[in-house]
């Protein structure tokens, strides 16, 4: 058990992108997924409870190392330069795409009451949004959806982790 | 009442309308259309005086508001005043509420631990280290990227607006030779490095013209690793 846990820790450390249980099981052949899940749970628990600079988070459908929130001021100092922030218009557009996907530009425009072409382009450039396909209606409009990178950037396991619109509405009241 | 506003304060016409509703402490289900329309139009006037492009985005809603206002002024025919009669404002209220939900959704997203802002992953990320040009994947630069970069340098160096008429102190040919010399020594230079060493506007312009001329003559090549990325200048033929 301890050995398996250490291997999993090493694999997550070495991986560029979040590693999911299936991928781990592939590498560690003959190990049951249940055992892998148990190890993951214990690893997460250990990193969270100990006084560590980083932890393992479940993000974009896999597991990955992330620094803990509290140390961001120092890391920013190390990295210099400001992180590329998203403007309020981009955030609104991204929210509509995230919740309404697969969605057409016309639908996003309607919700925001204004043309969103510029914001969509910027989101595409930032790889937070992608073209999912084209709708089979006259004009073949482009269908948009969010990317894996969107989940990674906003630390979401998957789209279901987004608060539902009803929850948001209740918060508002 | 003063209407001092910052242009980028509103994310669009619906945002402005929500702001007015909140400012006047109005019940969203019972909007006094005349009052709101009047205020909306005043803001539109200010936006228009500041930025014509942006004002266009706000015009459609202004028209909608006026349309609703006029419909509300018209007497409703007797037979149509039954229960459940359509309020002309209904559609707009629905749209406003929906917009509000997504606005909240956007702020909820914003509060999450955002990568590269609150939390970080292992490994370097763009912009934190000097990139090795050999490892970059390069795309050839178009004229607009060059002009954009030129404007950036001008913005940095061109503080004075004084007119200056003087004799030509440098020639384009000189500058071309200088650039070729520097490039032979350094293999590659970034666009800003090349322009940055020029102290005044005139020199910057000559440098820029020299670069354009050299590209035309196919003696140098300009690449960048991503759109709006750093522009690097290489000799077209390596000796």
Image (cartoon, helix red, strand yellow):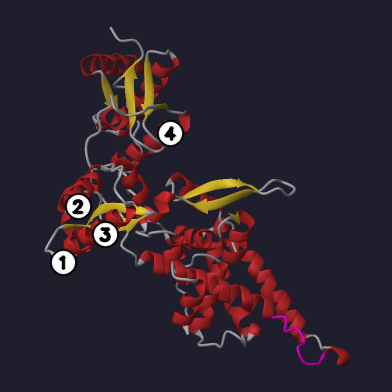
Residue most extreme to the front: A30
The answer to whether any part of residue B56 appears in the image is no
Can marks 4 and 1 be said to lie on one chain?
no
Residue that badge 4 annotates:
B145
Q: Residues within 10 Å of mark 3 (few under 14, many from 20)?
A: few
Residue name at image x 57 percent, y 64 percent: A112
Residue segment shown in magenta: B81-89
Residue name at image x 57 percent, y 73 percent: B98
Q: Is residue B214 magenta?
A: no
Residue that badge 3 annotates:
A38
Residue that badge 1 annotates:
A49
State left or right for residue B99 relative to residue B159: right
Residue name at image x 56 percent, y 62 percent: A100
State left or right for residue A120 relative to residue B77: left
Single out the mark in the foreground, 4 or 2: 2
Q: CA distance from mark 2 to mark 3?
A: 9 Å
Q: CA distance from mark 3 to mark 4?
A: 52 Å
* Dot 4: element: helix
* Dot 1: element: helix
The earlier-in-sequence mark between 2 and 3 is: 2
Q: CA distance from mark 1 to mark 2?
A: 17 Å
Residue B5 pos. (x, y %): 45, 70
Residue B4 vs A173, above or below: the answer is: above
The earlier-in-sequence mark between 3 and 1 is: 3
């Amino acid at each position: 058990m301890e050995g398996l846990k250490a291997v999993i820790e090493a694999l997550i450390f070495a991986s560029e992108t979040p590693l999911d249980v299936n991928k781990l099981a592939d590498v560690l052949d003959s190990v049951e997924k249940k055992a892998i899940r148990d190890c993951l749970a214990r690893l997460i628990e250990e990193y969270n409870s100990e006084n560590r600079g980083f932890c393992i988070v479940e993000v974009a459908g896999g597991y990955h190392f992330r620094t803990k929130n509290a140390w961001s001021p120092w890391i920013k100092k190390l990295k210099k330069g400001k992180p590329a922030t998203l403007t309020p218009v981009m955030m609104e557009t991204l929210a509509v795409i995230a919740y309404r996907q697969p969605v057409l530009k016309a639908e996003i425009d309607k919700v925001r009451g204004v043309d969103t072409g510029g914001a969509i382009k910027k989101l595409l450039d930032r790889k937070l949004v992608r073209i999912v396909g084209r709708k089979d209606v006259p004009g073949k409009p482009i269908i948009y959806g969010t990317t894996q990178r969107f989940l990674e950037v906003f630390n979401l396991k998957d789209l279901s982790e987004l608060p539902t619109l009803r929850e948001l509405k209740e918060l508002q009241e | 009442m003063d209407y001092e506003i910052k242009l980028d304060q509103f994310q669009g016409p619906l945002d402005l309308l929500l702001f007015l509703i909140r400012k006047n402490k109005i019940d969203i289900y019972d909007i006094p259309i005349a009052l709101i329309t009047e205020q909306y139009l005043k803001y539109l006037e200010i936006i228009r005086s500041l930025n014509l492009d942006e004002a266009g985005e706000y015009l459609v809603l202004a028209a909608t508001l006026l349309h609703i206002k006029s419909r509300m002024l018209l007497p409703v025919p007797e037979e149509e005043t039954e229960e459940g009669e359509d309020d002309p404002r209904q559609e707009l209220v629905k749209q406003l509420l929906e917009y509000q939900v997504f606005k909240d959704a956007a702020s909820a997203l914003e509060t999450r631990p955002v990568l590269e802002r609150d939390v970080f992953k292992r490994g370097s990320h763009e912009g934190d280290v000097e990139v090795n040009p050999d490892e970059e994947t390069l795309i050839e630069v178009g004229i607009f990227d060059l002009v954009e970069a030129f404007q950036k340098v001008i913005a940095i160096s061109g503080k004075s607006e004084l007119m200056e008429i003087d004799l030509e102190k440098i020639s384009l040919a000189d500058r071309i030779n200088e650039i070729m010399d520097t490039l032979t020594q350094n293999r590659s230079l970034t666009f800003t490095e090349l322009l940055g060493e020029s102290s005044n506007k005139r020199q910057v312009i000559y440098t820029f013209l020299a670069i354009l001329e050299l590209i035309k003559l196919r003696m140098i090549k300009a690449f960048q690793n991503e759109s709006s990325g750093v522009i690097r200048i290489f000799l077209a033929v390596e000796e």
